[in-house]
Image (cartoon, rainbow, N blue to C red):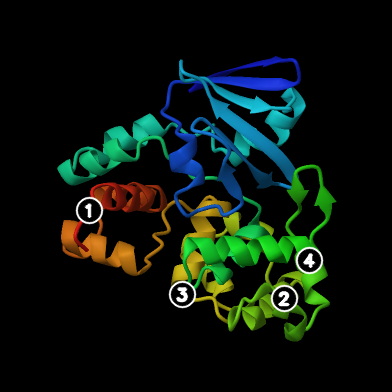
Amino acid sequence: MFTADFRNNNTYLTLSDPFSLAQTLDCGQAFRFEALSDTKWGGVACDRYIELEKTPDGQIILYNVTKEDFEEIWRDYFDLNRDYSEIIEKISENEVLKTASNYGSGIRVLNQPPWETLCSFIISQNNNIKRIKGIISRLCENYGEKIEGGYTFPTAERLAKLEVEDLAPLRAGFRAKYIIDAARKVAGGEIKLEALKDMPYEEAQKELLKIKGVGPKVADCALPFSHRHIEALPRDVWIKRALQVLFDGELPKVALPYAGIVQQYIFFYARETKLEI
């Protein structure tokens, strides 16, 4: 699916699968990346600042990423072990999904740190991308650790020691109390995030629903984007409307095993074509 070349402390990827940095890093699954140019992106993930660029010949360059860093962190983070071309081929049995996946074929579902993902999607409730990014940025600046290029995402243990009032500078509104509740449940061991990827999907979702302010939508965002439950289907208002317009409300059966990935294709397709939903 890819070959990697390591030189000058950079990693050079040549992929057989499509991989669009813009589609992957700006599709609503991660909130800490920004476009640095038409071809280059940068952001903090896994407690590291990373810059990536796509060359005219389609190669992906990961700057200041050694072979060890790539194998230990970024290979999994960018889901490079998954054959996306095979998934697209399977779901293309359905003509609408074939069209949608052609639009968003460069999207990859990231394997993000579980706590950061959960907290980020708690913040995302009834919110827009600009405000989500602003709240997360202030959260990291106030309670994360300073690193080259930015700040780390604060740990659940760090946030669990705070009171709701301490989060006032974030301007997170009603979400502040949910952040604190989630942090305390995770830090105290009531919710073991690292164990969720090994649970059946329904059981993992049930665990996340124990957290105040986490409903099925937030849980179903966290599960595919950080726990490998790609069968989870995040249903926000836009996806519900798109599913209704395109499929009378429900995904075709061929897509169900990959619902979390297919949802991203549908969202991108609906946005790019200005689908009337």
List x then y, in percent, for residue 130.
52, 61
Find disc 3 in the rendering and name its residue. Answer: 126
List x then y, in percent, for residue 24.
47, 42
Looking at the rendered structure, the kind of residue marked 2 is Pro
Nearer to the camera, 206 or 25: 25
Query: Mark 1, residues whose alpha carbon is within 10 Å: few (<14), some, or many (≥20)?
Result: some
Looking at the rendered structure, the kind of residue marked 3 is Asn
Estimate the spatial distance between the alpha carbons at disc 1 and disc 2, rounded to whole Å: 44 Å
Q: Which mark is residue 169?
A: 2
Answer with mark 3 or mark 2, whichever residue precedes in sequence.
3
In this picture, is 151 found above or below 149? below
Estimate the spatial distance between the alpha carbons at disc 3 and disc 4, rounded to whole Å: 23 Å
Q: Are marks 2 and 4 in contact (CB under 8 Å)?
A: yes
Does residue 270 appear in this view? yes
Q: Nearer the viewer, mark 1 or mark 2?
A: 2
Q: Nearer the viewer, mark 1 or mark 3?
A: 3
Estimate the spatial distance between the alpha carbons at disc 4 and disc 1, rounded to whole Å: 44 Å
Q: Residue at x 54, y 61 (%)?
A: 222
Find disc 4 in the rendering and name its residue. Answer: 142
Q: Residue at x 78, y 75 (%)?
A: 160
Estimate the spatial distance between the alpha carbons at disc 3 and disc 2, rounded to whole Å: 19 Å
Q: Nearer the viewer, mark 3 or mark 2?
A: 2
Q: Residue at x 71, y 80 (%)?
A: 168
185 relative position to 13: left or right:
right
Looking at the rendered structure, the kind of residue marked 1 is Pro
170 relative position to 243: left or right:
right
Answer with mark 3 or mark 4, whichever residue precedes in sequence.
3
